[in-house]
Image (cartoon, rainbow, N blue to C red):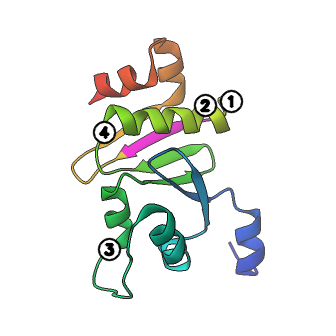
Amino acid sequence: MKGNWYVIALNSTLSCNWIDPSGRVFNAFMHHESWIDRNKELLMDYYGIDIPDSVTIDYTEFLMEQGWIRMLQDYNDLVFSIDKLSPDTLKIIENFIFGNYANNNIRKVWLSTEANTICFKWEDFVEEGVTFIDFVQNLN
């Protein structure tokens, strides 16, 4: 796709978010790592997370280890990068999806940890008729 990158970005359906351990959503715009860098003060003041000015550590992974969820939407696919598939984390993801995508305009959901990636079609989850947590745990 050719053209002005800014116009392309504005017309893109790509969306990046951070979700804190309580479920609060922060728009990371187009880049998760830049959001961390721009919000060091917020992370320290409200969450007690000190992000030093070092580039030797992957702070995306560090934030996820603190219970944060890295979320990416690309068209109708939702991708969640998480530290572990705990019931608490899955409940936050469930609340996020049902709070923001009530029309079920979702094609696939990806749940990715360092050790495992689960991908499923949203329609399979809906047809199963079980809770989100039960559905994911049955896939795992």
- Which label is found at residue 58? 3
Residue 4, position as x, y percentages in the image: 76, 81
Residue drawn at point x = 25 percent, y = 45 percent: 116
Real-space CA distance between mark 1 and mark 3, rounded to the nearest whole angstrom: 33 Å
Q: Mark 3 falls on what kind of element?
A: loop
Q: CA distance from mark 1 to mark 2?
A: 5 Å
Quickly name the residue at label 1.
Answer: 102
Q: Secondary structure at mark 2?
A: helix
Coordinates of residue 93 in the picture (x, y in percent): 48, 38
Tell me which label, 2 or 3, sits earlier in the chain.
3
Q: Position of residue 125 (x, y in %)?
A: 48, 22
Residue on which the image places disc 4:
85
Report the disc number at residue 98.
Answer: 2
Kind of residue at disc 3:
Asp
In the displayed structure, 130 sits above or below 99; it is above
Residue 139 lies in what quarter of the image? top left
Disc 1 + disc 4, Cβ < 8 Å: no
Tell me where the magenta segment starts and ends, as one range. 105-111
Mark 1 and 2 residues: CB-CB less than 8 Å, in contact? yes
Residue 129 higher or lower than 69, as above or below: above
Q: CA distance from mark 4 to mark 3?
A: 20 Å
